Image (tube, rainbow, N blue to C red):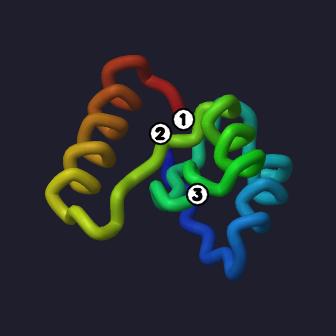
Amino acid sequence: PYVIVCNHQASLDLMGMVEVIPERCVPIAKKELLYLGTVGWACWLSGIIFIDRHRRDAAIDVISQTARTMQRENVR
């Protein structure tokens, strides 16, 4: 398993990054994107994992659970 870290400048950049990242790779995005109408729906339907940057404990839990799933299922 590996992690790709990208620093994008706008909410729509995430949609472009989804096209260039390797297959079987799931992006993690800020939860605020979920509430951007069509962009939020598209992100949610494509399987993006959302983290709440304002609640540190919840964000750590989501990332930890994702890491455990990656190790358990041996996915990248």
Label 3 SS: helix
Residue that appears at 43% across and 23% down: 74
Instruction: Name the residue type under label 3.
Output: Leu
Mark 1 or 3: in front is: 3
Label 2 SS: loop
Depicted 74 relative to depicted 17: above or below: above
Residue pointed to by mark 3: 33
Residue that appears at 83% across and 58% down: 16
Q: Quadrant of the C terminus?
A: top right
- Say left or right for 21 vs 34: right
72 or 46, nearer to the observer: 46
Q: Earlier in the sequence, mark 1 or mark 2?
A: 2
Label 3 neighbour load within 10 Å: few <14, some 14-19, many 20+: some
Mark 3 or 2: in front is: 3
Which label number is shown at residue 1? 2
Residue 7: quarter of image: bottom right
Which label number is shown at residue 76? 1
Residue that appears at 40% across and 30% down: 70
- Say left or right for 75 vs 38: left
Is the C-beta separation of discs 1 and 2 under 8 Å? Answer: yes
Which label number is shown at residue 7? none
Q: Mark 3 and mark 2: span between their CA atoms?
A: 25 Å
2 or 37, nearer to the observer: 37
